[in-house]
Image (spheres, coloured by chain):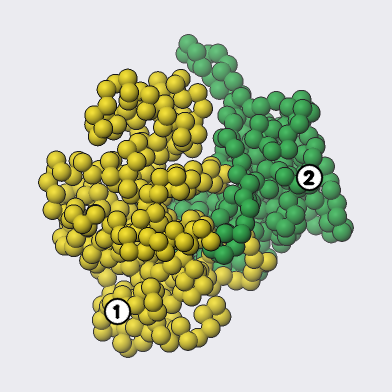
Chain colours: A green, B yellow
Amino acid sequence: MDNNKLLEIKNLKKYFYLRGGFFLQSNAGVIKAVDDISFSIKKGETFGLVGESGCGKSTTARVILRLIPHSSGSVIYDGKNIFELNHNQMFKVRRDIQIIFQDPYASLSPRMTIGDIVSEPLEIHRIGNKATRIKRVKELLDVVGLNPEHLNRYPHEFSGGQRQRIGVARALALTPRIILCDEPVSALDVSVQAQILNLLADLQKEFDLTYLFIAHDLSVVKHVSSRVGVMYLGKLVEIANSEDLYSNPLHPYTVGLLSAVPIPDPELERKRKRIVLEGDVPSPLNPPSGCTFHPRCPLAQEICSREVPPLKNYRKNGKDHFAACFFAGKSI
Amino acid sequence: MIKTKVIQDSYNNKVLEVKDLKTYFYTDAGVVKAVDGVSFDLKKGETLGIVGETGSGKSVTALSILRLIPEPPGKIISGSILFNGNDMLKLDRKELQNYRGNRISMIFQDPMTSLNPVYTIGNQIMESVIIHRKLKKEAALKEAVRLLETVGISEAIKRLSSYPHEFSGGMRQRVMIAMAIANSPDILIADEPTTALDVTIQAQILELVNEIKHKTNSSIILITHDLGVVAKYADRVMVMYAGKPVEFSTVDNIFYKAMHPYTLGLMNSITRLDKKKMGKLNPIKGSPPSLIDLPEGCIFRNRCRFSSDICKKSFPPLREIESGHFVACHRAEEILKKDQRAI
């Protein structure tokens, strides 16, 4: 089972150094957007990454693709560390790892027809000639449920859901193995959101894709993922099978997060006891000492403000379940 | 138990009655029928949820109640909005001022843009108390401190001199709520109050609004696209689609006995935390129509799986199918007979 790791992220860090003062010459602090996270994605699975805004989910995706430089750590793909590849080698890897962005309004150039948008990756990677590329674009538009005859239209002529389909077609153009989905449905209305989720599921089966699915909506992540990682202030605080994470969360942050989501069932809501986490997510510029969650944590003890809890495996029934908490699993 | 009793006691106690409201926007591309024939009533102490997707007319309905529609291009072309018997649409500017922010107030969606960045928090809260209650500055200051404490902001006295940019999103929304409840309004309109916030902060804010409602016995119109929020906080729910209400009933009826195909479609589209792994979702096909160019007959028929010939002919009026359960669908009775959850 463990040998089919397609992508392995090891001790990945991404720090942003802020500049301030006179002519921005002095160092104004460090934001640890991604702070030492490790996880792996298996072939054919969907790995969900959840967390609130500013927890480092999107930065993780961008660093993996080297859209922004990393600070330290490694990402192993196909036996090689992506960060050590030269320009040409990385160019090849990009064919295998593609990304779908959150905002279907900002991620498509308004000046290009959707045919041009979808065929651009093919042109850049010099695949086929003009005629075969057009054929391929039509095929792709058909696959994502758009009318292939519309390839000469511009993005503004499409609705949000259709635009997201265009983004999906673009990501599929190079027949990738992995697609990083960065909040692919959060800008969409529920009825359209469901259509896109179904589309992604169909494509996964058809093209044998592996997804890294990033979202803040816990129920969406539950629906699509086989395994889930929960992030808080740049750190992974819990990783488990989707089912175990949702039925038996170990980290108090995960417990609070799950409890905060109202369930669309009035009867159930009336009976449900809610744990409301107090306070705000602290500033990443000046994170709390020890466990960064301790000021909001109902279980916090003295040790939590002193030491950083390591990510430990609380294996159960042969399934890995990692949590970074000194009091993991203790009831609140 | 207590909850149901309160509702029954106040059953005939309508604070707000909206009848056949139509708000159109006149644009270069054509007339946008943003709200097209909305009627509902709001009882004392109840929370009315208005649900719908982008462009369904939820927010325009709310803005129309307070007459905050930018004119032109917008215009309320017909209908009436009775607040304690007075028609809000017939008031002049000055009379209207007595209601806005006083008897009816609003919490807007985006706390980042709805506070004024150049005034302190204290100034902004005091403004409405000074205008409506004619308090002197010192008394207003005291009142502002009390309000900030009510909404759970610690060290309130210090915070009065802060500017909005010094606050986080959740704190700003708390300030917005403090301003909205400053004059203990009869009606609080919350327009997507937590959409811009993270889920843990969302829970805090909604709990706060609910607490205030129970303390002051005011009525709330809660506008949201989140069915979970509606299930938790609403007593009755109006579902809107393309400017029209399509279903209106108690929260239990909407969730367990929905009759309109759109409501059913919405329920089938959502991913849920409380269910074991679901198979494929069963979404509504297509996307909402353009409000400029609505289909003939029923506005939902192009996306509806129950659509038949009769649906092409006329838009079905909102009918009371069962007691207190209104549905705008020609085929509501047939749908009711089938096992709805299995559809």
List the residue tagged with mark 1: B316
Quadrant of the rendered image containing residue A227: bottom right
| Circle 2 crowding by C-alpha within 10 Å: few under 14, some 14–19, many from 20 | few
Position of residue B15 measured from the top left corner of the image (x, y, whole percent) = 29, 56
Q: Viewer-proximal residue, A67 or A10?
A: A10
Position of residue A251 measured from the top left corner of the image (x, y, whole percent) = 73, 44
Position of residue B43 measured from the top left corner of the image (x, y, whole percent) = 35, 59
What secondary structure is marked by label 2?
loop
List the residue tagged with mark 2: A330
Give the residue type at disc 2: Lys
Output the chain of dot 1: B
Quadrant of the rendered image containing residue B47: bottom left
Q: How far apart are marks 2 and 1 (CA)?
A: 55 Å
Residue B68 in view: yes
Left or right for B136, reference B256: left
Q: Viewer-proximal residue, A197 or A251?
A: A251
Image quarter in which the N terminus of chain A is found: bottom right
Give the residue type at disc 1: Pro
Position of residue A39 measured from the top left corner of the image (x, y, whole percent) = 75, 46
| Circle 1 crowding by C-alpha within 10 Å: few under 14, some 14–19, many from 20 | some
Left or right for B285, reference B139: right
Left or right for A251, reference B76: right
